[in-house]
Amino acid sequence: MSAVSAASVADATHGRARRAAPDYQKAWFSAPAVVLIAAVFVIPLVIVALQSLYREGFTIAGYEQILGSTLFWRILRTTLEITLEASLLSLLLGYPLAYYIAQLDRTPRAIAMILVLLPFWTSILVKSFAFIVILGEQGIIKTMLRQFLSLELGTSLVFNRIGVMVGMVHFLIPFCVFPILNNLLAQPPELRRAALIMGASRRQVFFRVTFLLSLPAIVASAIMTVVLSIGVFVTPALLGGRRDMMVANLIDYYTREALDWTMAAALAVMLLLISGALIRVLSRVDSIDRH
């Protein structure tokens, strides 16, 4: 090998080493985050999984008892119903709101975004008690209907599925609005103008351009709302009725009243697996849409 070739090989090797160095440094920079995630999430999950298999020795009696329980399957069905209903309602309300905010100028848009963020500024426990007052028999809504429309609702708005939906949708709306809003603001306006120039109506532009481009954000919002709503227990406990008990409420019962930590841990592990399965399904839908 000539001296020139050897020098070229050496330079190329040195260049690759220099390019690889930043990646190695990035790995070190991410180490604290990895340690934090392991300490806050991974280790507690491992402890819960081990607890679900321990009751005076190694056993799977907790899982056998859960899978053989009619109560669990009924509560699981209720949990999935409430989760999917709340996620769907949040998307149906959040998408038009995000689309409206995206059309605003900078200052009105900032004000609207602050208003959307307001639910984050209050505890979910406080909001649940507030909804009991607002939706109750002598609450603001029923009082206004009686006084201004002379209308008497025969259906209660609280301590049933209606109250659960109101409380959960109020909590989930921001998680739908902001991903969709970010997607809408990132879409090039030239695409809509080009579609209009080519003769498409505004409705066609929305459904064939804007809506299709926002599908990844819709799926991301659906994943977040499903994950958040499937583990909610404060809202169903305060605003729901006896038929609105969710798996998280059952876990709360076993930890605080029955004091059966094995059953509570087994339920938590199963709830985690169900959440993972739902996320997997939604991720598959997103990958199909991208292709």
Image (tube, rainbow, N blue to C red):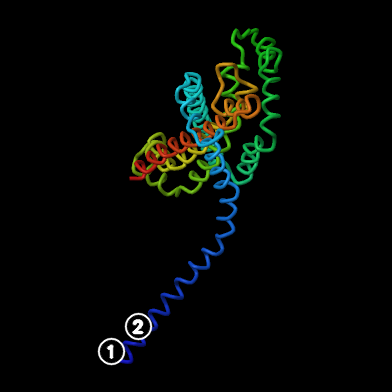
Quadrant hosting residue 11: bottom left
Within 10 Å of the Cα at label 2, are there few (<14), some (14-19), or many (20+) other Cα atoms? few
Query: Residue 123 or 275: which is nearer the viewer?
Result: 275
Query: Which label was assigned to residue 9?
Result: 2
Image coordinates of residue 97 in percent, x first then y, are 54, 34
Q: Is residue 257 above or below residue 277?
A: above
Query: Residue 85 or 243: which is nearer the viewer?
Result: 243
Outermost residue on the left side: it is 1
Query: Which label was assigned to residue 43?
Result: none
User: Is the C-beta separation of discs 1 and 2 under 8 Å?
Assistant: yes
Amino acid type of disc 1? Met
**Which residue is pictured at 60% across the width and 7% down the height?**
154
Q: Is residue 243 above or below residue 290?
A: above
Outermost residue on the front side: it is 57
Image coordinates of residue 99 in percent, x first then y, are 51, 37
Within 10 Å of the Cα at label 1, are there few (<14), some (14-19), or many (20+) other Cα atoms? few
Query: Which label was assigned to residue 1?
Result: 1
Image coordinates of residue 23 in percent, x first then y, are 48, 67
